[in-house]
Image (tube, rainbow, N blue to C red):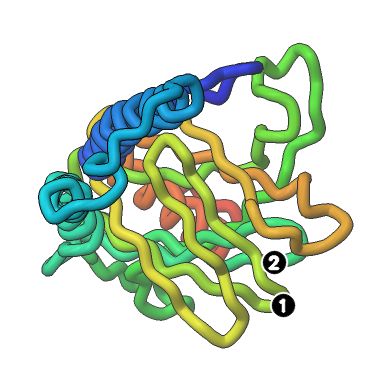
Amino acid sequence: MPSWLGLNFQDSCSFSSGELFFLHDHVMVIMFMVVILITYIMFYLLVNLKFYKFLSEGTLIETIWSMVPAFLLVILVFPSMSTLYIMEDYKFPSLTFKVVAHQWYWSYVVPLFKSLNFSLKGLGDFSFYEYDSMMEEFSDSEGFPRLLGCSSDFFMPVGVSSRLLITSTDVIHSFSLPSMSLKVDALPGRINQLFVNPSRVGLFFGQCSEICGSNHSFMPISVVVCSLSDFDSLGKSYLMDLMEDSLGGVDCSL
């Protein structure tokens, strides 16, 4: 959760976000050292009354200020490339979720565990289920942060490599989950993808981070990372409810 006047990132919820936070700290330390050095040199040149010509021109000093930045870039590029591969190089994701943006709510298409197919009489075969998620009315007694509570949470299993396919039906939105370091635009007529492997269970919040209209600030994202057994139970529960509706309210619970 973000906190008021907080200067740090939210607690990491995935391995890739942890690597991204480490890269940020690594870059900031180097930048801080460079800024201190440059500030010191500028201050020294301003207050120094003497002029040393070999400090402003000469083969040695030009070699030094050409090699040092190149060396710093080498230090920065290796962890940066490693983090990019960790975030994007998922050859075989176990589950694929579809996220569809609307004005102003989200629709989630969730696959059944292990891509199982269920056949319901008169309803056909099912390998996924779909539902909408809208912002819940704020109430002090609910215990949810203001403007972040949703009518339906987006459930995701822990420790499983998942792919998110993001698109939109009307205007440009943006799917953003800071604790998982996920952010991509939802574009109409185009599908973008994200990869995530949650490392711990919990409740995590995000929002649409694109100005998509007058109700842009009322389009929250609520993600529940649960165990594999709970994720499987949710799929079975949905199918049982669907079967009961098709059979006229007959109890079909296992």
Q: Residue at x 21, y 48 (%)?
A: 65
Is residue 50 in sight in this rendering? yes
Q: Which residue is mark 1?
A: 170
Q: Looking at the picture, which amino acid does disc 1 mark?
A: Asp
Q: Residue at x 74, y 34 (%)?
A: 147
**Secondary structure category for the residue under label 1:** loop
Q: Which residue is mark 2?
A: 102
Residue 63: where, in percent of width, then height? 13, 53
Q: CA distance from mark 1 to mark 2?
A: 6 Å
Query: From what the image shows, is residue 130 above or below residue 199?
Result: below
Local packing at callout 2 (Cα closer than 10 Å; few below 14, some 14-19, many 20+) is: many
What is the quadrant of residue 97 in the picture? bottom left
Q: Looking at the picture, which amino acid does disc 2 mark?
A: His
Residue 72 lies left or right of residue 219; in this view the side is left
What is the quadrant of residue 37 in the picture? top left
Residue 127 lies left or right of residue 60; in this view the side is right
